Amino acid sequence: MNFITNQLDFLSKYLPSYLRGALTTIELSIVGVILGLTLGIILALMKLSKSKFLNIISGAYIEIVRGTPMLVQIMIVYFGLKQIIPDNLSLLKEPMLLCALSISLNSAAYVAEIIRSGINSVDKGQMEAARSLGLNHKLAMKKVIMPQAIKNILPALVNEFITLIKESSITYTVGVAELMYAGKSISSGIYESTRPFVYAAIIYFIMTFSLSQAMGVLERRLAND
């Protein structure tokens, strides 16, 4: 009974801090997915284009980002841009903004490969049929190929979102007050090394499990369409 009371007291005191951290984590992940999706589409189209130069640029970016840890990328973007951005633009030096940019650049490489595989999964006859109807290549991609590709890769994109929720925890190293930062702060404040992180892990699990379940519902609905 004392154990339960102790846990309830702990939650009543620190739950707001966890929730604020979780909200920041979700915000980082959403920005990462949106900007990552935008850049990822561009990279995927560059890699699929007939231009060898665009192929090389896109391929090099994807390989470099996928071949290096996100933590290293965050450190490079965070400290690198802080040195370049003028002091009168201090708003652009905010840790939240710089980390969101880092996460977006990282996500773009993975999203690009997801989208490329999604486009390749669409039957080539679809493009030929669209062209035979008078659509140019750009319009055929926009109106015919991409809608089918997005439907095929939606589960993979949601998995990328889930991955970003978990990997965004490393942004606490540069002072972003996300969920991991909240757990670390609580741990330092009460001199406990386990319980604060256990509750942080539970909240991470709730977020990712809820998203996975929602994805399952969406997949079933799309399958019935």
Image (cartoon, helix red, strand yellow):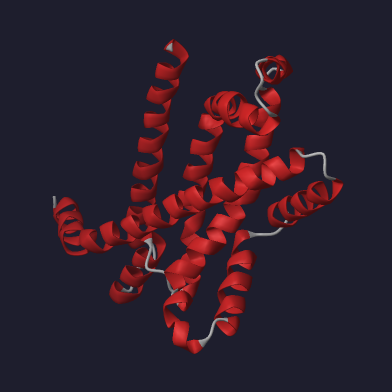
Q: Position of residue 167 (x, y in %)?
A: 52, 54
Image point 43% across, 68% down: which residue?
96
Q: Quadrant of residue 83?
A: bottom right
User: In which image quadrant can residue 78 be found?
Assistant: bottom right
Of 145 and 121, the residue lying toward us? 145
Front one among 85 and 129: 129
Vertical placement of 43 versus 81: above or below?
Answer: above
Q: Residue furthest right?
A: 52
Q: Is residue 44 left or right of residue 60?
A: left
Query: Toward which corner of the image does residue 106 lie, by quadrant?
Result: bottom right
Name the spot of residue 81 as percent of width and height, x first: 58, 76
Quarter of the rendering occupied by the C terminus: top left
Going by the image, does 128 lie left or right of 70?
right
Q: Residue furthest front?
A: 134
* In the depicted structure, whether residue 88 falls above or below residue 212: below
Q: Look at 75% across and 38% down and name the residue there.
A: 48
The foreground one among 55 and 157 is 55
157 relative to 133, above or below: below
Query: In the displayed structure, would residue 86 be above or below residue 66?
Result: below
Horizontally, is 151 left or right of 24 in the view? right
Name the outermost residue toward the bottom: 87
The residue under the point 39% across, 37% down is: 211
Tally of numbered tags: 0
Residue 62, position as x, y percentages in the image: 72, 51
- Residue visible at 63% across and 65% down in the picture: 73
Q: Residue 190's x, y, as percent?
A: 28, 73
Q: Horizontally, is 8 left or right of 69 in the view? A: left
